[in-house]
Image: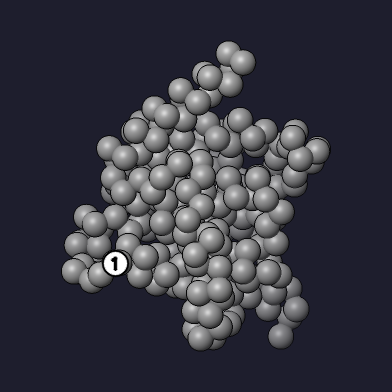
Amino acid sequence: MDQTKEQNDDYGYNLFPERKKSKYQKGSIGESLFTFSHKCQIMLHVAVETNPYAKVLLGALKNSGCAVYKDRHFSCEDCDGTVSGGFDATTSQVRGTASERSYVIYDRSLIVLCQNNIHQQAHMNRVVTHELIHAFDHCRAHVDWFNNFKHLACSEIRAASLSGDCSFSNEVARFNFGLKKHHQECVRDRATRSILAVRKISKEEAVKTVDEVFDSCYNDHEPFGRIPHSKKDARFAYRDFENRDRYYENL
């Protein structure tokens, strides 16, 4: 088998076929008001402008020297039917010292939004938040996405826990509820599924990796300062984030 293809499959790039193109061509005649792409762009705009989860993360990324911009760092693309979004770490570099870091983005965007699989605003909000958590982790830590399964598992645990993926309302909609410590179990399950989607490892190995890092990563609530179980929680987290930001500005 071709080594490049095998490597891409191992890292989940086969789920995002447009990542293999030299650059996604926008503005074509076929891109009209009624395309998936246009709808995706509108929902993305609403998410980054109004969703408190996304606003906390965008603010934290900016304060960390890794500002993410809607028009530059997101890309609406067609994907495999099993995924809703992705974080493409290969399109960025981190330069500078620990206290001054910034992304250098090349010809493709950092965050992929699967326009053929995201059809509702609530879903878009969760996907944007989930992938921004990966971007935040990529910014603040030396994450080895491709060679260290524990690093990947930790970020997937945080993304599942903090994005609203495992909120009570979402779990009821999936007919999953009523278990003791259900949020933790949901996070474990979704983190394991995410790893299996992008890495060719056994389920047993994925579960073991998640278990090994679960406690420390599940209890890492940055930049929210809490697990935002609802939009109300996220709004409180955003208020606290803004107040903390103003406090440091006045020092």
Q: Residue at x 59, y 64 (%)?
A: 152
**Quadrant assignment for the C terminus:** top right
Q: Position of residue 63 (x, y in %)?
A: 61, 30
Q: Residue at x 63, y 75 (%)?
A: 10
Query: Which residue is the extreme one toward the right?
Result: 96
Q: Nearer the viewer, residue 172 or 50?
A: 172
Q: Nearer the viewer, residue 225 or 210?
A: 225
Q: Is residue 63 visible?
A: yes
Q: Residues within 10 Å of mark 1 (few under 14, many from 20)?
A: some
Query: Which residue is the extreme one toward the top?
Result: 250
Q: Nearer the viewer, residue 230 or 8?
A: 230
Residue topped by disc 1: 182
Q: How is the image coloured?
A: one colour
Horizontally, is 52 left or right of 155 in the view?
left
Amino acid at pointer 1: His
Q: Residue at x 44, y 46 (%)?
A: 129
Q: Quadrant of residue 175?
A: bottom left
Q: Position of residue 168 (x, y in %)?
A: 24, 57
Q: Position of residue 21 (x, y in %)?
A: 64, 57
Q: Quadrant of residue 176?
A: bottom left
Horizontally, is 56 left or right of 118 in the view?
right
Q: Position of residue 151 (x, y in %)?
A: 63, 64
Q: Is residue 35 visible?
A: no
Q: Nearer the viewer, residue 187 or 44?
A: 187
Asked if residue 127 is positioned above or below residue 81 in the image, the reply reads above
Horizontally, is 94 left or right of 212 in the view?
right
Identify the element where label 1 is drawn.
helix
Asked if residue 218 is positioned above or below residue 180 in the image, the reply reads above
**Quadrant assignment for the N terminus:** bottom right
